[in-house]
Image (cartoon, rainbow, N blue to C red):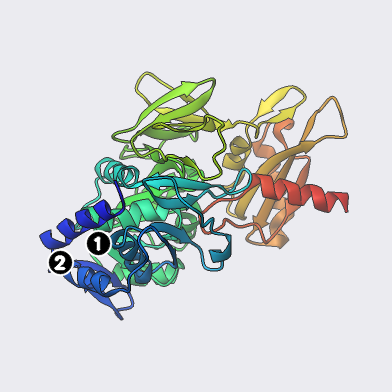
Amino acid sequence: MSSRTLYERWLAVAASCSEERAMWECDGLRSWTFGDLREAAERLPSIERGGFAIVEGTGPEFVLGTLRAWRDDAVLVPCEPGQRDSVPVRKMPKGICHLKQTSGSTGHPRAVAFTAPQLAADANHIVATMGLRADWPNLSVLSLAHSYGFSNLVLPLLLHGVPLAFVNDALPGTVASALEGMGPVTLAAVPAMWRAWQRVGVLSSQIEIAISAGAPLTLALERDAFEAAGVKIHNFYGSTECGGIAYDRSKVPRDRPTYVGTAMDGVALSVEEGCLRVASPAVADGYLDACADGMLGGGFFQTQDRAEMDGEGKVFLIGREGEWINVAGRKLAPSVLEEHIQPHENVHHVLVFGVPSKDVDRVDDVIAVVSLVDHSLWDGTRAALMARLPAWQRPRDWWLCESLKPDARGKLSRARWRARYLQERAN
């Protein structure tokens, strides 16, 4: 089954709501109905059958590039501006129509190969689980080149008729202006965005479905948004390799930071050797580098996320394999410290990791990298943070670094920042 089948499904969607608005720019410059979008896609120049369509950007042109690839049965390769030269263009296995690239937050990025049914399955799971609706358009603040943005924004538009509204950026003022001109919306974002919007009062009950993914959502942020604006931010847990995994369907804030939700519709979860295993029709065919590590393929993805599940199917993540910090024989998950540090009003972002200790009995030292709102308040901030933590969990070193901020996927790479810290310490 080829990407042309996705295009045929799109044509059926477009025919069913031809006069309805499909996508528009919130600054009022451009707007398309589903019929307009179908005609615009038909006019685009052809791609050689079986060729590659490298699509960049975050706006309407990305959507049109996707339709062009589907129309001409090409392999779609979404990428960020400037990443074109790193795209792995080579002969694809039969049936592959889409390449995603992992974030590389735990190592080197890898290309992941998908078939048309796998992409469609992920969209089906997301729309059904989250309750996405055509009368609650998606407000686009995410990169469409990333798995989260593509599956939550592009695929629901083209395969389910969920409209998409574009903003120029995710700054609070821009988002506030966009919301003023709209009715009820669905808003998918990353925790850093939700934090910035909450701090300046952008959030309102106009946001019917609020979704957060890409990084851990703290309990404090979720609670503050709910109490101040009546917005329940739903934690969404997924992976490039398999799309959506779990979703917090509850209507009130969570009470445990490790709780990420229950299995998405159409997804089955289990814990194998301490790590979460995903069974789903949305799981990719495999990695393009053909690394036969048994982690991915055949409808299964073995994650490196250490997890627990209760009798109700609730999933609790307790760290990633290989990221645990060994403090004198006691195991510490970095996310536990981050959950305590991040809510402080003077902390923009925080990342915790372990490095080998000069004290052999201690094994690892705990390092916390922090970017601050106000450097002049650091002494008081540090004292308050240390008081929140048991003695054995307190960082041996606080690295104040203003360049610490999430990437476009909302992620902070523990592996990269750990390597940078060790390099600077060596110098």
| Label 2 secondary element | loop
Name the residue at 68% across, 61% down: 402
Whole-percent x, y for residue 369 in the image: 70, 49
Mark before the other along the chain sequence, 1 or 2? 2
The quadrant of the picture occupied by the C terminus is bottom right
Across and down, in percent, residue 301 comes to: 46, 33
User: For residue 70, which quarter of the picture?
Assistant: bottom left
Residue located beneath label 2 in the image: 20
| Residue type of the residue flagged with mark 1 | Pro
Residue 12 seen in the figure: yes
Label 1 to label 2, Cα distance in Å? 9 Å
Instruction: Report the front residue among 292 and 413.
Output: 292
Q: Which residue is more in the foreground, 264 or 69?
A: 69
Q: Residue at x 32, y 65 (%)?
A: 68
What amino acid type is highlighted by mark number 2?
Answer: Glu
Of residues 360 and 181, the one drawn nearer to the viewer in this rendering: 360
Residue 182's quadrant in the figure?
bottom left
Residue 30, position in %: x, y?
Answer: 29, 78
| Disc number placed over residue 163 in the picture, else none | 1
Question: So how many labels did they put on this image?
Answer: 2
User: Does the CB distance between marks 1 and 2 fall below 8 Å?
Assistant: yes
Disc 1 crowd, CA 10 A, few/some/many (<14, 14-19, 20+): many
Q: In the image, what residue occupies the spot 17% across and 69% down?
A: 35
Q: Which mark is residue 3?
A: none
Answer above or below: position of 261 versus 40: above
Q: Which residue is farthest bottom?
A: 29
Q: Is residue 136 visible?
A: no
Q: Secondary structure at mark 1?
A: loop
Left or right: 164 as drawn, with respect to 364: left
Residue 262, image quadrant: top left
x and y percentages locating residue 177 in the rendered image: 35, 72
